[in-house]
Image (cartoon, rainbow, N blue to C red):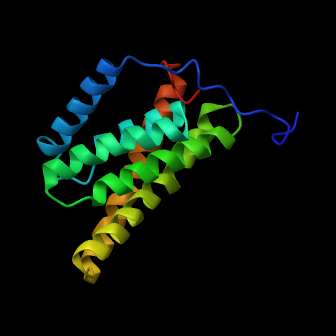
Amino acid sequence: MSYQSKSPPSIAAFDPDWWKLAIALYVALLLQTTLLHDTTASPALLLLLWYAVNAGAVRGALFGLIVGTCEDALSAGGAAWTFADAATGAFAGALARTLPGSPLPSAFAVIPLAIARYFVFLWALHNEHGAFTEPHWSSMFYQAILNAVLALAAFIIAARFDLPYAGR
């Protein structure tokens, strides 16, 4: 069977309780603002990518709006994170629906998603506050690469141990 003739997987089976997502987002933001504050890791990005890959583009974008709004509220950075997270959620959900049925291709799609997320953030922030200098661009690119590697590892581990919602 070719990939072109395969219909997209159904997202109806993926319906986690809202309160579980709220707790997961709270924990991710708590980690991101306390223990991982001086690092470039982003647990909120990992949670967003996991949700979007499993839930689809529309729900991924909506959850991205929520995640981004929380990040903007904690950073006082305008609406840049809201825009970047919503775009990332939509893109991740849409891309995951076009991949073959194995969870591993979903994991490999995470790398360009995480990088694209940060460049969308940079573009939004650039238009909001003015141009970045060179060191900002290089540090943001490094942060994007690190988050992509973390997301890839998380998806592979989840698929390896057949954890619930491990990429379909």
Q: Quadrant of residue 93?
A: top right
Numbered disc total: 0
Which residue is found at the position 45% from the left and 51% from the top?
88
Locate the C terminus and report the quarter of the image it occupies: top right
Can residue 27 be seen? yes
Looking at the picture, tell me which residue is in the foreground, 26 or 111.
26
Residue 160 pos. (x, y %): 53, 25
Q: Is residue 110 left or right of residue 98?
A: left
Residue at the outermost right position: 1
Asked if 80 appears above or below 135 in the picture, the reply is: above
Q: Quadrant of residue 80?
A: bottom left
Residue 55 pos. (x, y %): 52, 31
Q: Is residue 9 left or right of residue 12?
A: right
Which residue is found at the position 47% from the left and 30% from the top?
157
Residue 86 pos. (x, y %): 41, 49
Which residue is found at the position 13% from the left and 57% from the top?
76
Which residue is found at the position 24% from the left and 80% from the top?
130
Looking at the picture, tell me which residue is in the foreground, 106 or 20.
20
Looking at the picture, tell me which residue is in the foreground, 57 or 141.
57
Residue 154 pos. (x, y %): 43, 35
Can residue 37 be seen? no
